[in-house]
Image (tube, coloured by chain):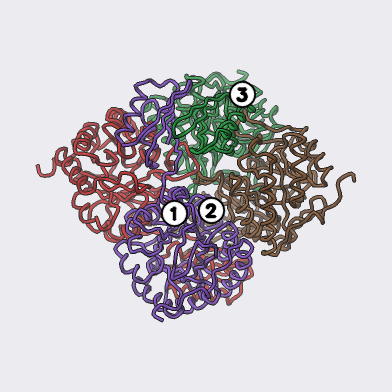
Chain colours: A brown, B green, C red, D purple
Amino acid sequence: MIVVMNSNCTDKEVEGVLERLRELNFRSHLSRGTERTVIGVLGEVYPELQDELEVLSGVAEVVRVSKPYKLVGREFKKEDTLVRVGGLPIGGGQTMVMAGPCSVESEEQIMSTAFAVKGGGATVLRGGAFKPRTSPHAFRGLGIDGLKMLDQAKAATGLPVITEIMDVRDLDIVAQYADILQVGARNMQNFSLLDEVGKPGKPVLLKRGMSNTIQEWLLAAEYILAQGNNQVILCERGVRTFEPATRFTFDVNAIPLVKRLSHLPVVGDPSHGTGKWYLVEPVALASVAAGADGLLIEVHPSPDHALSDGAQSLTFENFNKLMGRLSLIAEAVGRPLLTADNQRSPVGA
Amino acid sequence: MIVVMNSNCTDKEVEGVLERLRELNFRSHLSRGTERTVIGVLGEVYPELQDELEVLSGVAEVVRVSKPYKLVGREFKKEDTLVRVGGLPIGGGQTMVMAGPCSVESEEQIMSTAFAVKGGGATVLRGGAFKPRTSPHAFRGLGIDGLKMLDQAKAATGLPVITEIMDVRDLDIVAQYADILQVGARNMQNFSLLDEVGKPGKPVLLKRGMSNTIQEWLLAAEYILAQGNNQVILCERGVRTFEPATRFTFDVNAIPLVKRLSHLPVVGDPSHGTGKWYLVEPVALASVAAGADGLLIEVHPSPDHALSDGAQSLTFENFNKLMGRLSLIAEAVGRPLLTADNQRSPVGA
Amino acid sequence: MIVVMNSNCTDKEVEGVLERLRELNFRSHLSRGTERTVIGVLGEVYPELQDELEVLSGVAEVVRVSKPYKLVGREFKKEDTLVRVGGLPIGGGQTMVMAGPCSVESEEQIMSTAFAVKGGGATVLRGGAFKPRTSPHAFRGLGIDGLKMLDQAKAATGLPVITEIMDVRDLDIVAQYADILQVGARNMQNFSLLDEVGKPGKPVLLKRGMSNTIQEWLLAAEYILAQGNNQVILCERGVRTFEPATRFTFDVNAIPLVKRLSHLPVVGDPSHGTGKWYLVEPVALASVAAGADGLLIEVHPSPDHALSDGAQSLTFENFNKLMGRLSLIAEAVGRPLLTADNQRSPVGA
Amino acid sequence: MIVVMNSNCTDKEVEGVLERLRELNFRSHLSRGTERTVIGVLGEVYPELQDELEVLSGVAEVVRVSKPYKLVGREFKKEDTLVRVGGLPIGGGQTMVMAGPCSVESEEQIMSTAFAVKGGGATVLRGGAFKPRTSPHAFRGLGIDGLKMLDQAKAATGLPVITEIMDVRDLDIVAQYADILQVGARNMQNFSLLDEVGKPGKPVLLKRGMSNTIQEWLLAAEYILAQGNNQVILCERGVRTFEPATRFTFDVNAIPLVKRLSHLPVVGDPSHGTGKWYLVEPVALASVAAGADGLLIEVHPSPDHALSDGAQSLTFENFNKLMGRLSLIAEAVGRPLLTADNQRSPVGA
């Protein structure tokens, strides 16, 4: 961080800044030019420090030079991090597809979907048991019964399972069933949850908050890595903008930018990122063309009858079509689809 | 909710929609015009239903007519709700000011600030013991020690206390000390917390999420009222936009609009809503001119040395200046400042 | 502007930056610290220069220190600029109200409105003759006939007139009739128009673009001042955000911030800034409480029958109510309403 | 459009709405349900009509059913429109690349770039002679001299030329040199320019405004088609959001959505859409994967020395790399690159 002083600042003001930095345990480096005095701040800075220094007397501007995150950054670790899910690698040069319904609704629904997405080429099964809903009057998931149904589908198909954790009090039970713990967009800055979610040692998929910057997203991942768990997958799922024609605006720029800033794998969620089933395929292809390591896609046996997010879910038929086209794109960018052949045998088999 | 069918829809498609509504336990009303067929949906709808119906075959558009919330709406309850805080009413035609530091940092800091804001005319003391921070490396509050310091300041000044609750697991301890439980912007859609926070029966101040719509905000309040607690204060604190010159964009439109849509009291937080101490006073005055029932303002004995949010905190002197000007505005709009004279004697006195 | 070099930059890279600055005719100041090398850029910088320097080899970051605008800034001119409209001052410590219909629709409509807003206390008459419309199929104004009707209303009431200029080719004719030339939000970055609009020497009211930053807005004003005309009024009229419940989000923060950054007068337009007639009064009061020098308000004899913007127009009765309350707020902030008594006699009288 | 009345509306209010519709020359269809009365509006509606009806007494909500645009819509014309540029088709199932510098800076610069992009596989040369700049102090283009240099590059390479038109007064001269007239983002709602730009009968490339909705963009195109010119190319170039890490947020969702709503060809501009040269390739690939008919890309012989937009320009080498990868993606989606072989011989040859 660099503190730029006003051109007419006094010696006392300069000394005030230096003293404040000492109080906060930062080292500093003073550089007096003919027109400007500039103070470099050395040590592990955080975003709020900028505001805290800007308020000091004589300060014109405070500029960050080093990134506020550390463990998630490329500077800290150059090579890509591989996240291992049920024996499969994500982030290692192949394209992984996770698919399934928004919510687990019944044994029949999750079982048929699990076989369908496996048949289409998915290697992880998604399904929500605890659902965040904007209204207390909407369907909020089957809870533990849903987790058990996911487990049956996993046993039958061999697909590892990703499901959302919403409440720290549910962590033990969810971690018992999930192969990947998903932190949803609305909880990206639920710091109590972030402090805990990495502790069971399972991989964590961290969705970007709908109006969080890329830097805030990386800092949220930093919370998890700071607990000693670096098995984190980042998921772009669209941001909130003024455009009403789509549910969110999928930020495709974020994919290559995060790959450049961080060593963690990045996946795209075109289902939430568009909110319309007919936009899911083109935006899925775009995500992988832009560099995503995988996708998270909503599939439902009968989207018209889904209890949540039906409008953005693919039928089995449309999922198969998508996978055919995705395969061509994945080859074209040199990151072929991760296939069922690499997959370990069913749990308990 | 109204389902508008395509102009060329078939009878089978119309029947499909009607059947789906029966499955979901809604009643319906069919109206066939010469150019358009329209189906009215009767019952307690929720926002996601719109998406769920739009995906059905033959549907052109789905339109909400009634609001998705109920208990928080003016249609449900016409007269303003009074929230009682330590014997004082908020929402009853007077302007209430809650003030204090962002974080409790020391006994001396909170005690001096409590006396200063009381002297200036505040009737509630704010102070954070558990702080949400974007980075795991920043100061995260004193925790229970902070709550105890708030309690001492309350005992000494008689000011009731508002403090933030971030984690459901802390609810019992925080509710023991707080007169108002604050739900922060980043937790506005932490539905697990919303389900619990109303249960201790204390008033809840619900901040608007930095990128949540007014409707989502009212639905979040609906979670709390659905638990049987209608002592909810809504707090506008700025939304995220493209403008980089201020920390957030204070949505002054939201104040009169929410007063029209809901019976709950609304306060403004110009400290977070601007992020700059020199904008706090004009935006505080604007909030009250626009109809706010009160304000939440950050005050610190030495903003240059604050461990959080110093850039937006007022000195004691600037707080006093603000209160002088606010008093004139509050008179001009016919909602005079709620003063210390109405205040009950110190707890334990 | 300050160029911060990478910690491991080479001498050749430093020399490359210095050479590039020489090519662009900037002076520079080199400061080598133990950890960072920093280059100060001296001269009249512009925002795009930041991008142009960031791309150079070895550069970590480029930071602006001085503002990119000059003539509009407080540093260039400390005291408030008075803009004179038909003999009346705006920006001189009184609150000026400009009111009238969105579009001039008929002689009867503009005449009755002119008398009504004068009676209510407005001192400038607004009315559009050339209207920007999102669709080519909507009403686009009466053109020159509209200008003539405005002129009749001015002659009859003595109120000076503000009207929009959309096309440089119309500048002569519009300047002939207008006392203030209005540049609309959609034309805020129509640089061809900005280059010309100041030339007739009339005051210019420059609306902020619906998604332009405060800095871009000040730079657009800089175009006009650069032509030698400093009679510019800035108008905040709401920005585009994710919130669908209001037409725009009125950026009340911008009012005190622009007053701090610039010496030009600032007015608020609560009609466009909210899009709902029932929010116009509270946001008008908020604007003045926040420091606005005046207001621009839409009034129509029969908003239900307006050919444009009826939803946000006040009836004569509601305008009178607003003026009554505004008068109290204007007194409370020490900038009383500019009244008709100060007004010069009708043109030609 | 459908007008939904309040549940307790009176007969007089219903009659008021019907009468207002008659005044505005719309036909209507009244449908009285047991719970709701609904009025259908028939005729060519426009977006502002919604606001105009919502203000009427007794109206609960006004809903659009048909799209506000007509000529640009798929309902009006089912098959894709082919735009012909110098004998080459855009929108006909092949991927067209337009490339060149942001600004024409010198004969040498434009000539070398023209040969380089032709060699890489571009079939149209881009280059700005009149440049919109946020500050009056920045480089604003070579004007007519720039047009002449473009013409020389065209004669030498045979590449047709696209260049920006900013001012209606320059239309004749720009149309004389340009094969495609480009309307920039800041002029997307400069309705005076839109009214004229189609008249010379040249193809027009219409960039989306940085904060304009997809619907507003299509309505802007409607202005041009309404002049009898349907040779319009739409260009997505990023929208303004809260994310500061990229210059704009490229709205990849918009590409497949606009292809679905309209018959016009759509291209992506990843240079402006990201603002960083290292994001141009991935976002270019994503655009084509998502369905774009082509790309507009900035290339400069020496981006470090560009007079504008250097930070987002590709070197010749990086452009060649991009074209190699693009070719694979274009094949994978079945819309192969349009190559120089299809290109007609140089003008005048």
Q: Are marks 2 and 3 on the same chain?
A: no
> Which residue sits at x=28%, y=29%?
C320
Q: Residues within 10 Å of mark 3 (few under 14, many from 20)?
A: some
In the picture shown, does residue D242 fall above or below D334? above
Label 1 to label 3, Cα distance in Å? 43 Å
Q: Are marks 1 and 3 on the same chain?
A: no
Q: Which residue is under mark 3?
A: B226
Label 3: which secondary element: loop
**In the rendered image, is residue C46 in sight?**
yes
Nearer to us in this view, A107 or A76: A107
Q: Position of residue D137 (x, y in %)?
A: 37, 65
Is the Cβ of the residue at disc 2 closer than 8 Å to that at disc 1?
no
**In the rendered image, is residue B324 in sight?**
no
Q: Position of residue C170 (x, y in %)?
A: 24, 55
In the picture shown, does residue C160 fall above or below C44? above
Quarter of the figure that contains the C terminus of chain B = top right
Q: Which residue is under mark 2?
A: D251
Q: Residues within 10 Å of mark 2 (few under 14, many from 20)?
A: many
Q: Residues within 10 Å of mark 1 (few under 14, many from 20)?
A: many
Tell us which disc is closer to us: 1 or 3. Answer: 1
Q: Which residue is under mark 1?
A: D209
> Which residue sits at x=36%, y=32%?
C281
Tell us which disc is closer to us: 2 or 3. Answer: 2
Under mark 2, the amino acid is Asp
Instruction: Output the chain of dot 2.
Output: D
User: Is residue B113 found left or right of D63 in the rendered image?
Assistant: right
